Image (cartoon, rainbow, N blue to C red):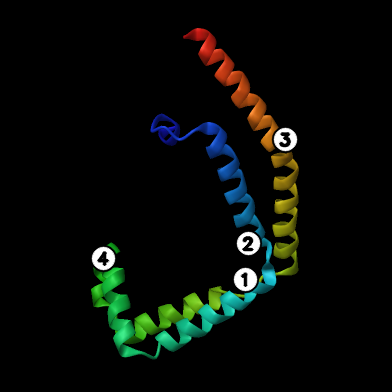
Amino acid sequence: MELVRSGVREDFLIPSLRDMLTEELQHLAKTEAADMRRESTRESFHRYAADPEFIGRFRDDLALRDPAARLMSDEDIASHLHDMAERLRPISHEEAQEAWSRIERWTERTSVISDQVIKDWHDRYTTRVLRDI
């Protein structure tokens, strides 16, 4: 609503949001690429766990949200980083299927909000506004 109130036309906003969400769901459904990103991040976390400078910066970042983090030892921080790395497991077959099902359901639903439907809505809206002037 804020965007519309600030002057962004709905007939521009709706297709843009629809297309942005579609791209994001497609990106998430690319499970092979996601697995590669997860593996890269996992390796980085394990590397960071052995880097005293990174551990210090990470502790400082944690302490911004939780002051008790300042009391954590380097070993505790390293263990935390290793735990985070292990949570980044490859995507299961079921998760991959669900990602593709989600994009299929989204595609079916967005076909209802086609560019033509938006154009028709805008034409009717404009006619009503002009009539009320």
Image quadrant of residue 52?
Answer: bottom left
At 60% from the left edge and 41% from the top edge, which residue is drawn? Answer: 15
Q: Position of residue 80 (x, y in %)?
A: 41, 78
Q: Earlier in the sequence, mark 4 or mark 1?
A: 1
State if disc 2 and disc 1 touch (CB < 8 Å): yes
Closer to the eye: label 3 or 4:
3
Q: Amino acid at mark 4?
A: Leu
At 54% from the left edge and 9% from the top edge, which residue is drawn? Answer: 131
Q: With 22 as the anchor, is 56 left or right in this view?
A: left
Q: CA distance from mark 3 to mark 2?
A: 22 Å
Q: Earlier in the sequence, mark 3 or mark 4?
A: 4
Residue topped by disc 2: 28
Q: Earlier in the sequence, mark 3 or mark 1?
A: 1
Residue topped by disc 4: 64
Q: With 43 as the anchor, is 116 left or right in this view?
A: right
Q: Amino acid at mark 3?
A: Val
At 75% from the left edge and 68% from the top edge, which residue is drawn? Answer: 93
Does dot 4 land on a helix, a strand or a loop?
helix
Q: Earlier in the sequence, mark 3 or mark 2?
A: 2
Q: Position of residue 116 (x, y in %)?
A: 70, 33
Q: Earlier in the sequence, mark 1 or mark 2?
A: 2
Q: CA distance from mark 3 to mark 4?
A: 45 Å
